[in-house]
Image (tube, rainbow, N blue to C red):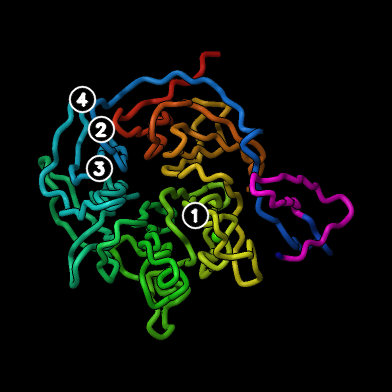
Amino acid sequence: MKKLFILSLGLSLVACGENGKQAENIEQVTENDTVVQNSPVTIPEEELTTEEYEYEVVVPDLDIAWGMDFLPDGSMLITEKNGDLIHFHNGQKQLVKGAPQVYNRGQGGFLDVAVGPNYESDGWIYFTYASEEGEGEGGNTALMRAKLENNQLTSKEVLYKATPNTTRGQHFGSRISFDGQGHLFFSIGDRGDRDVNPQDLTRDGGKVYRLNLDGSIPQDNPFVGRENAVEAVYSYGHRNPQGMIYNEETGEVWVHEHGPQGGDEINAVKKGANYGWPLVSYGINYDGTSFTDETSGPDFEDPLYYWVPSIAPSGFVHVTSNKYPELQGDLLVGSLKFQYVEHLKLDGKTVIAREKILEQIGRVRDIIQSPAGDIYVSVEGKGIVRILPKQS
Ligand SMILES: [Ca+2]
């Protein structure tokens, strides 16, 4: 555990997780005006409140709509895990031709879609998916960009393909975000090989990656020039990030990631930082045994927030829209396991409350805010729904 320096008027909040571990949040404790420590927060299940929201189904009859994004004309691109790319336009679903060939196994398949930041001038759309491309049996996560012309993907370029291929079905990631400064971030999970991949900078998996929009490697990436390092890596020691946002207020990319049993995390991604998996964690193994006694350490970046028990997070939004005043400035996270959307109230970078919305809606796979400021949620077996703002 890191040492805490508690001085004069530091605001302290103590919360007990179900596993009996105690977390202290020392908010902006300072020593000679230097921020010393900001320990991770957890809020126990008993304090999770519920709030009712109405919703309407916008795109019905989808299987596992893994990712979605809006084009400038208000139409929507939707990835189905099985490999289908759907263009939802004027209330009609159209199957787009030329979608990437996906390795549909376990948690792998067609993953995220993100319309590029310069789409109106360059037409680029970005995709992540599990791919069998390259040597060896099985697959690994790939990033492609392409253009949409006459209901067909054209100008396809594979910008990244992780190696090696493996037949393991776990932890492909993956989400895509842009930082508004010409970079693309995407995630790849540890591929079910936790003791080999996440801590090894020469291997893919268990990482957050940063590329230029054309797929080239930014020369100021943290491991450029290090011998045998994967130079696209921006941060490491991650388990399986399936939610990613660019937080415009802090200028940071944030991810959430699945923990083992307990220990799902929200991390603010910092250049070159190690997020600790599997050396430190607030979780335990699924068989109840502990794989590490350490929750924190001097070489590791602490999470901003962690969940015990795990909610199995997928999809992540930082709400900037003023259509939902009670959500504005806060985070929304989908729960696959408990089948709701979690609203995390933020005070700066500190989570101060948890609220369950869309209770029992189904396994929540993705959440986005549309350019018009509406919030859309992808629910497995149901389709895509829009959360209706509360009438004042
Ligand atoms: Ca961690």
Evaluate whether residue 253 shows in this view.
Answer: no
Task: Name the spot of residue 300 as percent of width and height, x first.
Answer: 60, 67
Nearer-the-camera pick, 67 or 87? 67
Tell which circle, 1 or 3, labels the residue nearer the N-terminal end: 3
Assess whether mark 3 and mark 1 are in contact (beta carbons under 8 angstroms).
no
Task: Name the spot of residue 105 as percent of width and height, x first.
Answer: 24, 53
Direction from residue 378 to residue 41 in the image, left or right: right
| Residue located at (49% from left, 50% from top) | 256
Tell me the crowding category of disc 1: few under 14, some 14 to 19, or many 20 or more residues within 10 angstroms, Cα based: few
Q: Which residue is mark 2?
A: 75
Circle 2 sits in a helix, a strand or a loop, which is it? Answer: loop
| Nearer the camera: disc 1 or disc 3 | 1
| Nearer the camera: disc 2 or disc 3 | 3
Amino acid bearing label 4: Asn
Q: Quadrant of ligand 1?
A: bottom right
Evaluate whether residue 369 shows in this view.
Answer: yes
Q: Which residue is mark 4?
A: 90
Amino acid bearing label 2: Ser
Task: Name the spot of residue 276 as percent of width and height, x first.
Answer: 55, 66
The disc placed on residue 229 is none
| Nearer the camera: disc 4 or disc 1 | 1
**Region in magenta:** 2-28
Residue 5 belongs to magenta span: yes
Tell me the distance, in whole angstroms, between the alpha carbons under discs 2 and 3.
14 Å
Quadrant of the rendering where the N terminus is positioned? bottom right
The disc placed on residue 79 is 3
Tell which circle, 4 or 1, labels the residue nearer the N-terminal end: 4
Amino acid bearing label 3: Thr
**Outermost top residue:** 392
Q: Which residue is mark 1?
A: 287
Tell me the crowding category of disc 3: few under 14, some 14 to 19, or many 20 or more residues within 10 angstroms, Cα based: many
Circle 4 sits in a helix, a strand or a loop, which is it? Answer: loop
